[in-house]
Image (spheres, rainbow, N blue to C red):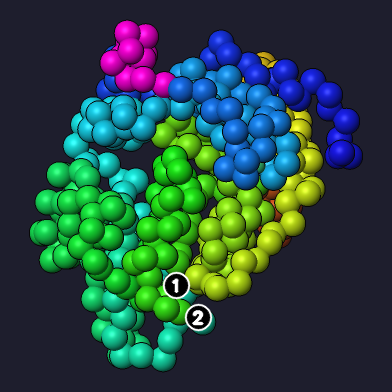
Amino acid sequence: MSDINFPEFRSILLEKGRIPRKLNENAEQQRLLFLEYIKNGKIRTEEVTACQCGCRDLERIAEIDRFGLPFGALICKKCGLVITSPRIAAESLPEYYDKFYHVLNYGHLHVHDQQALFRLWQGNKIYRMLKPYLPDVKELSVLEIGAGTGNVLKEMTEEAAKEGVTVNATGTEYSTDCIEECRQAGIDIVYGDLDTMVAQGATCDVLILSHVFEHFTDLRAELDKIKKLLKPQGLLYIEVPGLCNIGNIATYNFDFLEYLIHAHMYNFNRTSLTAILAGGGFETLCANEKAEAVFRPCETATVVDTSSNYSDIMGYLEKLVFSREFLKEGILNFSTIRNNLKDDLATVHRWHEHEKAEAEKFARWNEAEKERGDTARRWHEQEKKVATELMHALDVHFKTPYTSVRAKLESYRGLRETFAKYYKRYFG
Ligand SMILES: [Zn+2]
């Protein structure tokens, strides 16, 4: 199945007694309240017994989600679709989204306090991905379901305008906070979802589901609605958090449980996403493991081979668990190394202090020596002067011509006086 042979990975995936994601105070309070709502049945949950592909051979691979809440995950052994189970029952979803979703997921009480919905460049990226498949037209109608604060539509409109294409953008939202933000940004926004737009008889060239598709429960039913909304040759952009991309996103910490979230009914990789879309009558134009994909409705049904997807995903999860355990061990080792380094540093510090004291001592000693040296030099200069004077006196005496005894005697007296002066100085 995989080359890592890490058999305990299944039991590690099924861990229960922890909260994988660090929560702030708002989110923590909301989490406890949510648990209470589940316990007393105010929010109803249900077990999933069959995959979207019809298969009932499901294997449990998680007991909790990133909040440590009792929403685990099952994997379909036939197609590899990872399904949240238990999940929030359809009738409880409106209350859940209204009361719990935003605070629990983002930790902020108001939309305008949070950054997650303002993801920059998302609109530019989507436009670039769609571009190769867009018809050569001057006008494009774009519909985004779950438009958030309207950032994607705004960026797409600006990006298309650079190429002389006018985008007629419409978005839908449930959050009144988001609707207000969209209105302020001048975006045409409708309260509702796919049903609302179908009921209005709307059509579009491009339909965007950016981090929305994974929230749907009945995927086939939603795809049927999308087909009604898309014009012939229209494009469908879907982006979801890619299951086989967990290892590339730093915030997941190689942790499958940190990726899982109860609001996502399904977790897709490239294969399971394109397979579901193929089953719903969409051909894949492009798709990657980040789970960014462009589709087009088609008449003839296509089939995606999912036969190895279960083992591919389990192999990926095994590698992920292995990486996380390896990392944990690494962090442990690192902290030992860090402590050792701290000890070494303290030793170096002590040694440095000692050296500093020695250097100060030496500097003081050096000053004293210098002074002694100066004194010696002064004394030496003095001596030199004395010696020169004496030599000069001797010179004068011996060079005095012997003209008379009297003259010689006087010269000798001069010499004796000089000697006497210095004799007195040194010995007297
Ligand atoms: Zn399946």
Residue 349, horizontal then vertical, whole percent: 61, 21
Q: Quadrant of ligand 1?
A: top right
Q: Is residue 241 magenta?
A: no
Which of pointers 1 and 2 lies earlier in the amino acid sequence? 2
Mark seen at residue 419: none
Q: Is 8 situated left or right of 280 in this image?
A: right
Does 212 sit above or below residue 45?
Answer: below
Which contiguous range is marked in magenta? Answer: 35-45
The answer to which quarter of the image holds residue 8 is top right
Give the camera-side residue of 330 and 374.
330
Identify the residue at horizontal 88%, vertical 30% (top origin): 5
Between the residue at mark 1 and the residue at mark 2, the CA separation in whole angstroms equals: 8 Å
Callouts 1 and 2 close, C-beta under 8 Å: yes
Identity, as a three-letter code, of the amino acid under mark 2: Tyr
**Does the Cβ of the disc 2 residue fall within 8 Å of ligand 1?**
no
Q: Nearer the viewer, mark 1 or mark 2?
A: 1
Does 274 sit above or below residue 2?
Answer: below
**Does the Cβ of the disc 1 residue fall within 8 Å of ligand 1?**
no
Residue 266, horizontal then vertical, whole percent: 52, 40
Residue 33, horizontal then vertical, whole percent: 29, 14
Name the residue carrying label 1. Answer: 235
Give the camera-side residue of 118 and 34.
34
Give the camera-side residue of 87 and 18.
87
Give the camera-side residue of 23 and 274.
274
Q: Secondary structure at mark 2?
A: helix
Name the residue carrying label 2. Answer: 133
**Image quadrant occupied by the C terminus:** top right
Q: Is 182 situated left or right of 397 in this image?
A: left
Identify the residue at horizontal 68%, vertical 42% (top origin): 80
Question: Can the viewer see residue 161?
Answer: no
